[in-house]
Image: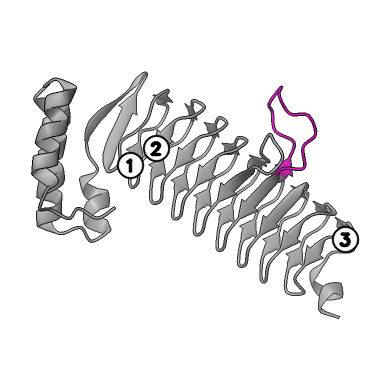
């Protein structure tokens, strides 16, 4: 009875799909045979969920999204690769999340993330928890974005780039190399501009922790020392300090 009231009659759901009875599926959505969807998730109208895709509980998938479709990778040869999505994510209109390229690999999205409209997550990406990605962010394959990062809108992230925890990336930037944690990055090409002070304070970092990060920022980006000397100074700086990771 619950399935009859929560799944619209125009939705196309393969009989082998594993859909929790509390999942709501709106008109004209399409769900493939290998899909698993957890409790209280909402699948919007015209959304497509395909491939070996596992979605947790309490997610909101808005109209027109495409999740688990084949990767845009010329090396893809039909492998039964995965998409794994955690809990409480908001996946807005027309977001695309591609499955991984090779057998046994996965594209992973953690918990409590917000992917705004037209975001693209390429094959083999790993996205942490509480990440915010604004409209029209295009993330190429094999990118790793750590938890609590904020990616502003209308930008591209090059493949294999690693964006650190609690980093903030300015809109319309070109992200072609790694972004350090806790930093604000902006430009074309992007450059580190400062610490993400507002983010650190909002996340409850103490004044002492922020001071230590300011010292690290100064060694790395203001003093212009050779990299070996920077490493020595940073080791001395953090030897008896415990900056959270």
Q: Residues within 10 Å of mark 2 (few under 14, many from 20)?
A: many
49 lies above or below 187 = below
Image quadrant assignment for residue 125: top right
Q: Residues within 10 Å of mark 3 (few under 14, many from 20)?
A: few
- Drawn side of residue 51 relative to residue 140, left or right: right
In x, y percent, where is residue 150?
A: 39, 44
Which residues are drawn in magenta? Answer: 68-81
In x, y percent, where is residue 173?
A: 40, 26
In the rendered image, which residue does mark 1 sit on?
A: 167
Q: Nearer the viewer, mark 1 or mark 2?
A: 2
In the rendered image, which residue does mark 3 sit on?
A: 16
- Drawn side of residue 191 relative to residue 40, left or right: left
**Residue beneath the point at 72% across and 56% down:** 44
Asked if the residues shown at circle 1 and circle 3 are in contact, with their CB atoms under 8 angstroms apart, the answer is: no
Q: Is residue 166 visible?
A: yes
Asked if the residues shown at circle 3 and circle 2 are in contact, with their CB atoms under 8 angstroms apart, the answer is: no
Q: Is residue 47 visible?
A: no
Mark 2 residue element: strand
In the rendered image, which residue does mark 2 sit on?
A: 163
**Residue beneath the point at 40% across and 32% down:** 171
Asked if the residues shown at circle 1 and circle 2 are in contact, with their CB atoms under 8 angstroms apart, the answer is: yes
208 lies above or below 68 = below
Q: Nearer the viewer, mark 1 or mark 3?
A: 3
């Amino acid at each position: 009875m619950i399935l009859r009231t929560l799944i619209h009659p125009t939705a196309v759901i393969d009989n082998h799909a594993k859909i929790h009875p509390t999942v709501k599926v709106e008109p004209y959505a399409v769900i493939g045979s290998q899909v698993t969807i957890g409790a209280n998730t909402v699948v919007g109208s015209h959304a497509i969920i395909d491939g070996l895709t596992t979605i947790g509980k309490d997610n909101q998938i808005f109209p027109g999204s495409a999740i688990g479709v084949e990767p845009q990778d010329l090396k893809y040869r039909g492998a039964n690769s995965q998409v794994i999505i955690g809990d409480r994510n908001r996946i807005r209109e027309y977001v695309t999340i591609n499955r991984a390229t090779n057998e046994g690999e996965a594209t992973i999205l953690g918990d409590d993330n917000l992917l705004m409209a037209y975001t693209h997550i390429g094959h083999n990406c790993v996205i942490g928890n509480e990440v915010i990605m604004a409209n029209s962010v295009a993330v190429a394959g094999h990118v790793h974005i750590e938890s609590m990062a904020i990616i502003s809108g209308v930008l591209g992230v090059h493949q294999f780039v690693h964006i650190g925890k609690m980093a903030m990336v300015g809109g319309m930037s070109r992200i072609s190399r790694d972004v350090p944690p806790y930093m604000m990055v902006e430009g074309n090409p992007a450059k580190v501009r400062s610490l993400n002070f507002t983010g650190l304070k909002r996340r409850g970092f103490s004044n002492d922790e922020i001071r230590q990060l300011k010292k690290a920022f100064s060694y790395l980006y203001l003093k212009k020392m050779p990299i070996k000397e920077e490493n020595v100074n940073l080791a001395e700086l953090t030897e008896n300090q415990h900056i959270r990771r």
